[in-house]
Amino acid sequence: MRVLFNEELEQVADDLETMVSDVQASITTAGTALLNSDIEAAQSVIDGDAKIDDLESSIVDQCVQLLAKQNPVATDLRVIVSTIRLASTFERMGDLARHIAESARRAYPQPAVPQQARDLFVKMQKRVEETAAQVVEMLSNRDTKTADEIIAGDDVLDDLHHATFSVATSDTWEGTSQDTINLVLLGRYYERFGDHAVSAARRVVYIVSGFDPTKEPEHTAPDPD
Amino acid sequence: MRVLFNEELEQVADDLETMVSDVQASITTAGTALLNSDIEAAQSVIDGDAKIDDLESSIVDQCVQLLAKQNPVATDLRVIVSTIRLASTFERMGDLARHIAESARRAYPQPAVPQQARDLFVKMQKRVEETAAQVVEMLSNRDTKTADEIIAGDDVLDDLHHATFSVATSDTWEGTSQDTINLVLLGRYYERFGDHAVSAARRVVYIVSGFDPTKEPEHTAPDPD
């Protein structure tokens, strides 16, 4: 479903989709940096985050201009307000990809991911890449079916995140304190990335349906931090 | 400086100030829960977070209504858009206070804070309470001087946060993996609380001055007059 009507709204929608594509590339490259100790990949994510930040500023500025010039109502207004909030969510997802890349750079040439938790982080990376692809699809077609899948699918990432704590507190854990610190921080970054995707999915449901599922008790809103 | 003009805008501003006061009470009580292993305090923060979430929803709804009815421009428009974003920031600060309370509840009757890092968390708690008080003051008078102090003062919290890693990686660290996990997660919550206060301060500078300092990280806000 396409809910953006005139050219200026289309431009903002295009910029928002560009922002999401950049976030998708950023989290994918951050995974390469983290799991392959690839310093060039890490640096490219860190350097590239400024573009995502600039896109957010541009999108907010465009939305403010549209509000000033058009006095939009109903769906158009909902789209513009939600676009401002979505841009903020995607900017934060970009920050989290950068944090993952920074962890890889800090640990380089050693891997930032403790060996005993590597399999879990490989799975978390695969999962966030799938989630990022879903967010791109959702944005390109304002598809609430994909939004619902993102919301429902976040449990997978949460379970993997909790599993990292089980590894670090098991009798067989051989990691140093620094390993534990890396495991906790990286796990947190992945978990937040997923939570922000859920937050974005809820906003798209709101755009399309006018209904805010975060107000439904059976949907627990994520806690983007 | 007061930049909200008509009654409806005043109502939103009052709700936003109520939200900030609730966040201040929440982070203060969360500190009591954490540092005194006070389970009742923890539960009250956890239960009270729903009110902060509801206030955000109400503020956003009111702002959308104002945008639909009034076609505000210039400062009024900037105030309304910034209010939507500020409400989101304060909602997240409330979430972080809840996370701290949940950590205290999870560890109860044991303290969630490792003994060797207790002094640092006492200092971090003191610092976020000072920050919360500054945010309340800033909101009540749209004071960019206080906003500047919040932005400049965040280094204190960042330094305390980094110090927790030094404790956990020192040769004298006697904590378990669970202690290290708690230290990292709690430190992250405090750091993020401070980051959100800085974000709120930048938005208030934007409301008052029309200049967005997030686009110039080194910028110190201009005098509103």
Image (spheres, coloured by chain):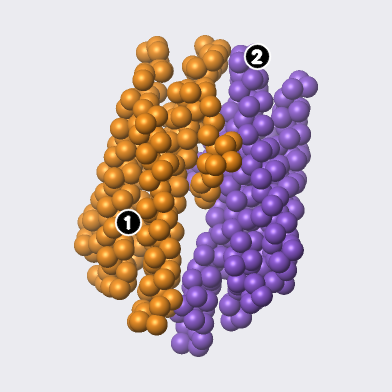
Chain colours: A orange, B purple
- Left or right, A73 with reference to A185: right
Across and down, in percent, residue A61 comes to: 48, 26
Q: Residue A119 or A115: which is nearer the viewer?
A: A119
> Is A37 situated left or right of B172 in this image?
left
Question: Residue B118: which quarter of the image?
Answer: bottom right
The local crowd at label 2, few if under 14, some if 14 to 19, many if 20 or more residues have their Cα within 10 Å, is few
Q: CA distance from mark 2 to mark 1?
A: 46 Å
- Residue A191: percent from left, percent from top: 42, 54
- The amino acid sitting under disc 1 is Met
Q: What's the residue at 32%, 56% (across, down)?
A: A124
Q: Are marks 2 and 1 on the same chain?
A: no
Residue annotated with mark 1: A124
Front position in the image: B167 or B23: B23
Give the residue displayed 38% in from the left and 54% down from the top.
A157
Q: Secondary structure at mark 2?
A: helix
Q: From this view, report whether residue A160 is shown above or below residue B135.
A: below
Q: Closer to the observer: label 2 or label 1? A: 1
Residue B204 seen in the figure? no
Q: Given the image, what chain letter belongs to the residue carrying mark 2? A: B
The relative height of residue B170 versus residue B75 in the rendered view (above or below) is: below
Q: Chain of mark 1?
A: A
Question: Residue B99 appears in which quarter of the rendering?
Answer: bottom right
Classify B122 as above or below B55.
Answer: below
Circle 1 packing at 10 Å, graded few (<14), some (14-19), many (20+), is many
Residue A188 at least partly seen: yes
Looking at this view, name the residue that lies furthest to the front: A218
x then y, percent, for residue B127: 67, 62
> Residue B70 — which label?
2
